[in-house]
Amino acid sequence: MTTALVTGASAGIGKTFCEQLAAQGNDLIVVARDAARLEALKNELELAHGVQVEVLPADLADRAALQRVADRIADPQRPVDLLVNNAGFGLRKSFIHNTIEQEENHLDVLVRAVLVLSHAAAGAMRARGNGAIINVSSVASFLASGTYSAAKSWVTVFSESLASELEGTGVTVTALCPGFTRTEFHQRAGIKAEQAAPGFMWLAADRLVRDCLADVAKGKVVSVPGPQYKVITSLLRVAPRSIVRKPKLVRRHRPNKED
Ligand SMILES: NC(=O)c1ccc[n+]([C@@H]2O[C@H](COP(=O)([O-])OP(=O)(O)OC[C@H]3O[C@@H](n4cnc5c(N)ncnc54)[C@H](OP(=O)(O)O)[C@@H]3O)[C@@H](O)[C@H]2O)c1
């Protein structure tokens, strides 16, 4: 039995990771801002699977709160065997229409939190000679469209780089790159899901997480679940940058008239 720490555990992909990891008999540490949802998840998973779930509420954009999570990960008395850096969100507007504070908050959750928590985990896991880190990136990391895509590009490249640095230490790093997945993400970002992409482009979180965990077991560094996204990302990897920058490939966050 191992212990996994999952950020963004209160909803969507993070919650699905918790459900599947608990069903496999793993203890959990669940991190997000909504403490009530985390407590409900703890009760549900402890009852269903007989595992231990520790609730650690934190806003990952808050440096002190983030440090508390990093300290928990690095605690040698209570080892964390799997870190899932999953918390994230999309901004409702495009770069020039956001305040710099909104952009910095976004960057702090999507990038800085991944950096700080991976650092805490990699050091502790390397010292023990085993462990795994999953960084939830995006298919958008293969595009050049908006600060979301820029931040996710950082997550994918960082994960690949850390995986190389840790090769042979017993610690694996995997960037999970989901395509459109049915969660609360689009509603929170003010995106109408039905207009965002055609039906065949949508993934179920259950299948996404199952495929990712299978890729982690195989030691895969980049996990792209779904045959449609395997094809798209293979093409994007070799496409000229002018195609990668094509605005039509992604939804633009345009402000409403009243904004
Ligand atoms: N859904 C997609 O189509 C899709 C595609 C590609 C990549 N992704 C990535 O997948 C990851 C999970 O997203 P999701 O689709 O599962 O979205 P979701 O259903 O909206 O869940 C997002 C999670 O992140 C947490 N979170 C957001 N801001 C936070 C903060 N400041 N501090 C701590 N936790 C925070 C939320 O919890 P609280 O509100 O309780 O804090 C929630 O648990 C994200 O990194 C996202 O970028 C999603």
Image (cartoon, rainbow, N blue to C red):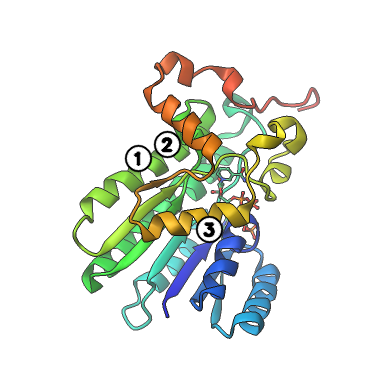
Q: Position of residue 104 (x, y in %)?
A: 51, 41
Mark pair 3, 2: CA separation: 23 Å
Q: Is residue 87 at all visible to an observer of this figure?
A: no
Q: Which residue is mark 3?
A: 210
Q: Which residue is mark 2?
A: 153
Q: Nearer the viewer, mark 1 or mark 3?
A: 3
Q: Position of residue 70 (x, y in %)?
A: 40, 66
Q: Say which quarter of the image contains residue 170.
A: bottom left
205 and 188: which one is in front? 205
146 and 250: which one is in front? 250
Q: Which residue is mark 1?
A: 157
- Identify which residue is drawn at 39% across, 39% down: 154
Contact (CB < 8 A) between labels 1 and 2?
yes
Q: Label 3 crowding class (10 Å Cα cut-off): few <14, some 14-19, many 20+?
A: some
Q: Earlier in the sequence, mark 3 or mark 2?
A: 2
Task: Label 1: state its secondary structure.
Answer: helix
